[in-house]
Image (spheres, helix red, strand yellow):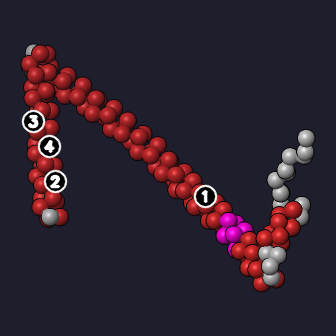
Amino acid sequence: MGRSPVAAGPGDGRQEKAMGAQGDGTSAAGGVGDAAARLAQDTGELARKEIGAVRDEIMTALKRLGAGGLLLAGAGTCGVLALAAAHTTLLRALGAVLPERTASAVLSCAYAAGAVGLGMGALNRIRAAARAAA
């Protein structure tokens, strides 16, 4: 049994010897091989540096967006709580004048009318923007 071939590692001289063996014909071929190897090494190093820089930029942007997203989620939660409190206040105020079921129905109709009005306005704006873009 013979020894199994060992992969040439950086700095152990085998890679350089193998490259020299490829260019045995002339010294110009060896020079081109060395230049190609240096070019490949420099290109790889440059690509690693650029990828690292892009990764750092993305992480910085995500951290900023993450903080903004958390603030926006907090604002949304506060908005929902404010709407719930306003609903309760309106229901109690109407409950003093109307029976409770009627007060709930009046508020539900008011909310539905507001939703329809806002939806129609949004739809009109979207259609206008689509016409302007076409």
Classify mark 1: helix, strand or loop.
helix
Residue that numbered label 1 is attached to: 56
Q: Report if residue 99 is visible in the image.
A: yes
Residue at 9% of width from left, 29% of height from top?
109
Q: Quadrant of residue 91?
A: top left
Classify mark 3: helix, strand or loop.
helix
Mark 4 packing: few (<14 Cα in 10 Å), some, or many (20+)? few
**Structural distance between the alpha carbons of marks 1 and 4:** 42 Å
Q: Give coordinates of residue 125: x percent, y percent.
A: 14, 55
- Image quadrant where one finds the C terminus: bottom left
Residue that numbered label 2 is attached to: 126
The label nearer to you, 3 versus 2, is 2
Q: Which region of the structure is painted magenta?
A: 39-45
The secondary structure that dominates the magenta segment is: helix
Residue at 13% of width from left, 27% of height from top?
107
The label nearer to you, 3 versus 4, is 4
Query: Residue 19 in magenta?
Result: no
**Structural distance between the alpha carbons of marks 1 and 2:** 38 Å
Of mark 3 and mark 1, the one earlier in the sequence is 1
Disc sitting over residue 113 in the figure: 3
Amino acid type, mark 2: Ile
User: Tags 4 and 2 in contact by the CB under 8 Å rule?
Assistant: no
Q: Considering depth in this image, is 114 or 7 the residue closer to the camera?
A: 7
The label nearer to you, 1 versus 4, is 1
Classify mark 2: helix, strand or loop.
helix
Amino acid type, mark 1: Asp
